[in-house]
Amino acid sequence: MTSPDETGQSAANLLCKACGLCCSGHLFIWVKLRPAELDPAQALGMQVYRSDPSQRGFNQPCPLWLGQCTIYTSKNYPHACRAYKCKLLKEVIAEKTTLPDSLTAIEQTKNMIRELEPLLPALPNPNFRERLVARIERPQDFAEMQASAAEFGQKAAALLDVYEKIFGVNDLLEKP
């Protein structure tokens, strides 16, 4: 893995703590939990969905993400969270990308998200990804936002490209 810095943290650990896009609802809509994780997750304050065995988990953004993961070192840290490695993290671990370059890519992505945020519908759902997909897939539902349609289209396409090329997330939109 990556060597620790002067604080004893690996580059991978520093990258994840600086990023959080997989926790904040920017890359994913929900997180799947194992059956044994349902009660501990609920006890931590997550709204856990249990009814469908194939859809047991919690929605993003994670309520325990407060600018960084508040349960990162907890024994109840979900397996899916522990196991997930985005493309950028894999490249840092393999030393194909440096930590400074990765942190720059994350900051650029967050800037793109900040630029898109005001162009998204203000739905009751706080999940950025769901609001982004809704605006892309159903533009007719957002007629009041037509003035920003061209700007939105360019910025959304650029962000989706970054999600795929940098983070390896390419399943935001249903492919026909």
Image (tube, rainbow, N blue to C red):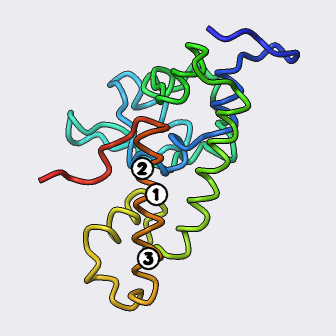
Picture quadrant where residue 37 is located:
top left
Q: Residue 29 at x, y = what percent?
A: 38, 49
Q: Residue at x 45, y 45 (%)?
A: 163
Q: Are there few (<14), some (14-19), or many (20+) residues within 10 Å of tag 1?
A: few
Write the residue at 34% across / 83% down.
142
Which residue is nearer to you in this view: 25 or 37? Answer: 25
**How far is the residue under mark 3 from the one under mark 2?**
21 Å
Q: Tell which tag, 3 or 1, sits nearer the viewer.
A: 1
From this view, report whether residue 70 is shown above or below residue 75.
below
Of the image marks 3 and 2, the number of the one nearer the N terminus = 3
> Mark 3 sits on what residue?
121
The correct choice, above or below, for 14 with respect to 55 in the image is above
The residue at the far right in this view is 6
Horizontally, is 93 left or right of 148 in the view? right
Cα gap from disc 1 to disc 2, whole angstroms: 5 Å
In the drawing, does residue 73 fall left or right of residue 129?
Answer: right
Q: Are marks 1 and 2 in contact (CB under 8 Å)?
A: yes
Disc 1 designates what residue?
158
Q: Which residue is mark 2?
A: 161
| Number of numbered callouts drawn | 3
Foreground: disc 3 or disc 2:
2
* Type of the residue with mark 3: Pro
Mark 3 lies on a secondary structure that is: loop
Q: Mark 3 near mark 2, Cβ–Cβ under 8 Å?
A: no
**Secondary structure beneath disc 2?**
helix
| Quadrant hosting residue 139 | bottom left
Q: Nearer the viewer, residue 60 or 166?
A: 166
Mark 3: few, some, or many residues within 10 Å (few <14, many ≥20)?
Answer: some
Q: CA distance from mark 3 to mark 1?
A: 19 Å
Q: What amino acid is at disc 2? A: Asp
Give percent across and percent down for residue 92: 60, 21
